[in-house]
Image: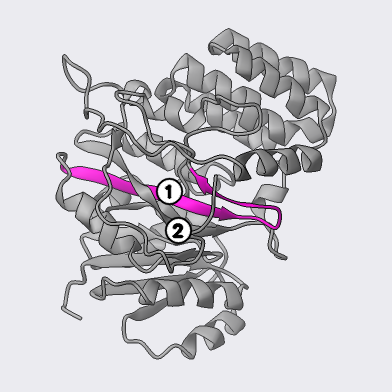
Amino acid sequence: MSSAPEVSVVIPTFARPDLVTRAVRSALAQTVTDIEVIVVIDGPDQATQDALSGIDDHRLRLVQLAQKGGAPNARNVGVEHAAAPWTALLDDDDEWLPEKLAVQLAYARTATVALPIIASRLINKTPRAEFVMPRRLPFDGEPVCEYLTVRRGLFHGDGFIQTSTIMAPTSLLRRVPFTVGLRRQQELDWTLRALDHDGVDLVIAAEPLVLWHQDEDRPRISLNSPWEAQLEWVRKMRPLLTPKAYAAIMMSIISSMAAPTRSFRVFRMLLGDARRHGRPSAIDYLTFFQIWLIPPQLRHTLRDRILSRRRPAVEQTPATSAAPGGRPSTAEHPVRTAAAVSPVPTSSPGSDVHV
């Protein structure tokens, strides 16, 4: 490996030695070999150190933190240690397909902005179904915040971004660190704040390049409902959101976290906030009411059955990076849709999924 690798891979982890070992091996198996893999162990964790010490590869580096600070903090620490011009993020419970970095670097080389964020589709693997997300690529000139949040179906959104799909300039990740203490929507928060800077655009590769494992037998932040903190977060983010995006987040994401309270006061508060500061659509209202009326497990089962029967729309025309007349605000920032560079190998895991 050269003194400056092409890509730094940052993996935060704590107390999940088997999972992080799987993630590390998928990073080291990339067809792009000039990389470094930085695992940030978020607090005292001898089991993880022992597991990773069995991987004999000089590209692997361990950073041990003295105390737990959470995944956003661990990512920020890893980025500070990164030696490459590009940093790719990988959660410890996910895997990359072998050509993930090669495909993203190809997109990066053709980017027309100084600081492109390169994301991709992923394969969502649950015990009930496997399907590709996001369901579609962005429309021409579509605001990022609306692409990532506004729903067109009762049980799903069309747009999506997840941490393990993101590769970005290391300088951008240092300029815009992850929000420490934020428990949910970390990648949405980071993406919207990053896009508020000059010279930044989001490019989404059409290929699914990541395996996103859900519902495995392990603790998950998403099983908790810190809805009050997330409500405070979305209110702070309102300047970076269009009214449509604000209403969609309030009536779907925040509501799905608050619904287990079964509180009519919370129901009214969220509905009123969405109507006062946002512009809800008919789908938003239907989504809101079904979230509060249908039990979460049944809702998740229905969602997975619907998505597993549908294919994503892939054919898209590349979007322009800015609207006529100058650079848009973050709330209106359009997404650039990337054309395919190379296909996912047919022998790769999950390549036969149907959506």
* Residue 276 image offset from top left, x and y in percent: 59, 8
- The single residue placed furthest to the top in the displayed view is 276
137 relative to 171 in the view: left or right: right
Foreground: 353 or 225? 353
Where disc 2 sits, the SS reads strand
Residue name at image x 49 percent, y 22 percent: 245
* Residue 118 image offset from top left, x and y in percent: 30, 48
Give the residue type that dot 2 points to: Val
* Residue 217 image offset from top left, x and y in percent: 72, 65
Foreground: 178 or 106? 106
The C terminus appears in which quarter of the rendering? top right
Where disc 1 sits, the SS reads strand
291 relative to 38 in the view: left or right: right
Foreground: 136 or 9? 136
Q: Is residue 336 visible?
A: yes
Residue 140 shown in magenta:
no
**Disc number for residue 121:** 1
**Disc number for residue 210:** 2
**205 up-or-down from 295: above or below:** below
Magenta residues, start to end = 114-133
- Distance between the Cα atoms at labels 1 and 2? 7 Å
Q: Is residue 64 visible?
A: no
**How is colour applied across the structure in the image?**
one colour
24 relative to 130 in the view: left or right: left
* Residue 238 image offset from top left, x and y in percent: 47, 22
**15 up-or-down from 189: above or below:** below
- Circles 1, 2 touching at the beta carbon (< 8 Å): yes
Q: Quadrant of residue 19?
A: bottom right
Q: Residues within 10 Å of mark 2 (few under 14, many from 20)?
A: many
